[in-house]
Image (cartoon, rainbow, N blue to C red):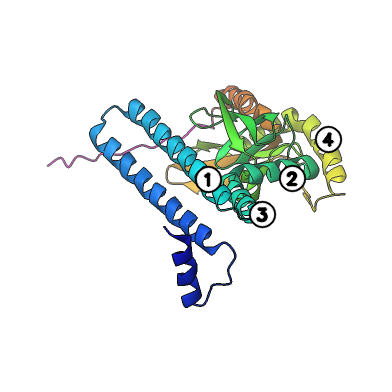
Amino acid sequence: MDQNVMVEFFENIGIGNIELNSNLVISIILILSIWIINRVLIKITHKYMENVQRFYYVKKLINYSSITILLIVLISIWLMSGQSMTTFLGLLSAGFAIALKDLLINFAGWLFIILKKPFEVGDRIEINNSAGDVIDQRIFQFTIIEIGNWVDGDQSTGRLIHVPNSKVFTDNLANFTKAFQFIWSEMSVIITFESDWQKAKKILLEIVDNKEISIIDDAKSQIKEASLKYMIMYKNLTPIVYTSIEDYGIKLTIRYLCDPRNRRSSRHAIYEKILLAFNEEMDIEFAYPTQKIYFNDK
């Protein structure tokens, strides 16, 4: 394409004062052309190549080749024109900024994590619908060892999840252990309507009170310390048992404080004590869904 013709075209439409206008338009046309060719080649390859793994590597090769050719031709156009490299370098740096946008945001996220410390290595967190213990923290990502998912009681699954640092800007972050290092846990039992529910409730409170005394003392001191930074105003830290009615019995729900990493073991210990205690009481029975069938004898 003749650059004089291109310059004359810009002058005719009133934008002839734009610096390096012909090179700029040629570059844009070149970028669009290579992008279209790239898309067409990928679609043709996908149509005739059934092997998914092979298509993946061929697709990567097409993308890398397209970028390499584009850069070589662009550099040739701008260098051979004898124009100042300032504009070209500016466009190149802008292109790199766009291409490396995710890396830059992840780096900013790393700075935020280092300075503001929403979590540290060793904390138990939940972010982007994934929960686990932070085991590594790097410039572009941090790593947690997953808990929960298909495993009950917030125990480890053994999987490592690598989370981009940028997620601290876009997703809600829950920290189980920062400032106040305990969580509220609940567990329920259902007894029959004929059972002595008041006695059962008393037994449950005694079981949880005996287990949680030391944790309550620690929690009180931590709340006092955390209140210097956060508005945490728990007035009652002692265990409590709530009463409700279900279709087939009386539901007693225990609410108590526990260490996030010991939730399953605490539930295990409490349930075993409940089974042993209720087994000794003749007037307390567990309830379960039942059906009554009536036969009309005539």
Bin the neighbour count of mark 2 within 10 Å (Cα to Cα): few under 14, some 14-19, many 20 and up: some
For label 3, the residue is 86
Distance between the alpha carbons at the discs numbered 4 and 1? 73 Å
For label 4, the residue is 217
Distance between the alpha carbons at the discs numbered 1 and 3? 15 Å
Question: Which of the pair 50/265 is nearer the observer?
Answer: 50
Residue 141 seen in the figure: yes
Instruction: Reply above or below: 286 against 35.
Output: above
Part of the protein shown in magenta:
283-298
For label 2, the residue is 112
Q: Quadrant of the N terminus?
A: bottom left
Q: Residue at x 66, y 54 (%)?
A: 86
Q: Which amino acid lies under the numbered mark 4 shown in the image of this protein?
A: Asp
Q: Which amino acid lies under the numbered mark 1 shown in the image of this protein?
A: Ser
Q: Earlier in the sequence, mark 4 or mark 1?
A: 1
| Cβ–Cβ under 8 Å for marks 2 and 1 | no
Instruction: Reply above or below: 88 against 209.
Output: below
Question: Which of the pair 37/293 is nearer the observer?
Answer: 37
Q: Earlier in the sequence, mark 1 or mark 3?
A: 1
Bin the neighbour count of mark 3 within 10 Å (Cα to Cα): few under 14, some 14-19, many 20 and up: few
Per the image, label 4 sits on a secondary structure element best described as helix
Distance between the alpha carbons at the discs numbered 2 and 4? 34 Å
For label 1, the residue is 76
